[in-house]
Image (cartoon, rainbow, N blue to C red):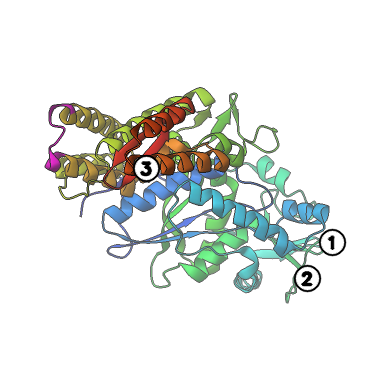
Amino acid sequence: MKKIFIFDSVKKDKVEFISIKENIVKIYVCGPTVYDNSHLGHARSAIAFDLLHRVLKVNNYEVIMAKNFTDIDDKIIKKMNENGKTLEDTTKHYIDLYKKDMELLNILPNSIEPKATQNLEEMKEMIENLLNKDIAYKTESSIYFDVSKDNLYGTLSNKISNETQARVENDKEKRNSADFALWKFEKANDVAFNSSFGKGRPGWHIECSAMIKKHLAYNDEKYQIDIHCGGADLLFPHHENEASQTRCDNGQTLAKYWMHNGFVNINGEKMSKSLGNSFFLKDVLKSYSGEVVRFYLLSTHYRADLSFNEEDLIASKKRLDKLYRVKKRVYGVNANQNDKDFEDKVLKSLNDDLNTSIALSYIDGFISNSNDNLDKNPKDKTLKQRIVSNIEFIEKLLGIGGSDAFEYFQFGIDEVLKDKIEKLIKNRSEAKESKDFEKADNIREELSNLNISIMDTANGTVWERL
């Protein structure tokens, strides 16, 4: 098995990845709080760790991938009260939209997708245990975790900020300003659940620890899971708090490795709902296909901050277009010739902390060489089979290049125009069959006036927008 290196956010260094159990990797990704449409930040995280998922699979690991949905939260309750719908209806609506967006981005299915509200018993058990150990304590408003009881608190992020934590959870009854809520007692217009320690709902941090313990954790190992992933903004306090809860609950270390993706910036500012510059993914997907957005986000290394601008998105689309133009040139050919040298080079670059810039440079070289070789040997079947094999490998590893070569160039054409084009193509085929070549030529010209190019193949006529 080839060596894989990842950047561990705790060690702040690139380290060799060695799974807890041979050939198995357990990964937990912090998912969205489902009260609104997904934005580019959600897409960035999803694509970054989908790439990790794919790279591990190609390296012959069995990957158990979990991403949670936070479906109980202050913002969700506010949205629920505004729209007059139930908690379940509100969250289901946004979960469905999120999943639809992820499908368009070609994100591999997760093995497990736990929801906070479906794991309340596990959260209550952890809180009970922490109360019994006097690591958690009760106030009038909440049950808090006492960070002073954990002498390792802060070792995950090396970034303790009492002011930051205090702004999030401001309660004068807290023992320490950095203490955080495990359970929030019921208040007006709230959603609450019964528990032995009082009616209320869980805090944000406890849900991930409880869900990992229930769905993923090794009970007989030092570490519960192999890799914990999330956005850079979650390292403190969210991941710090998760790690502390787990450590104090049963003495285990939550994750062997921690990986974090960089921010998305718009106009030089970190993308944030509070700043009012959050860029909804659905708006981008109206003008660009999910595959183009995926390719654009892959073009920047996952740990680096990404400055979103449409000029770069357009340039990224043109770069991806080149791959599909090669794919058009080998249309209808089946893969039969693996290019081990190409595959090894691309995989080696991605095994080095998901180095997409080097991987994509190899793909650019492959595209250029393919065009040159096809110009010299347009009928070389073995060459074409090898090209198709490489494109299929790119799709498996990077999640791009898997669309039909002609349908890729049809993006943005509405259904009415598509129907008109399909009817014209059908009429042209009938005209050719009846030897009415003048009519067939006139239809081709009509299609050309619509900026539609057609190509006759053994499998029928295919078309694209110019």
Q: Which residue is mark 3?
A: 429
Q: Which residue is located at x 46 percent, y 67 percent? A: 216
Q: Which residue is located at x 31 percent, y 65 percent? A: 21
Up-down: is 446 above or below 100?
Answer: above
Q: Quadrant of the N terminus?
A: bottom left
Q: Residues within 10 Å of mark 3 (few under 14, many from 20)?
A: some
**Residue 199: image tag:** 2
Q: Which residue is mark 1?
A: 187
Give coordinates of residue 141: x percent, y percent.
80, 60
Q: Which residue is located at x 58 percent, y 43 percent? A: 160
Give the structural element (helix, strand or loop) at label 3: helix
Give coordinates of residue 288: x percent, y percent.
51, 35
Q: In the image, 357: left or right of 27?
A: left
**Amino acid type at image mark 2:** Lys
> Which of pointers 3 and 1 indicates the residue nearer the eye?
3
Q: Which residue is located at x 87 percent, y 60 percent? A: 188
Report the span colored magenta. Answer: 375-383
245 inside magenta stretch: no
**Amino acid type at image mark 3:** Ser
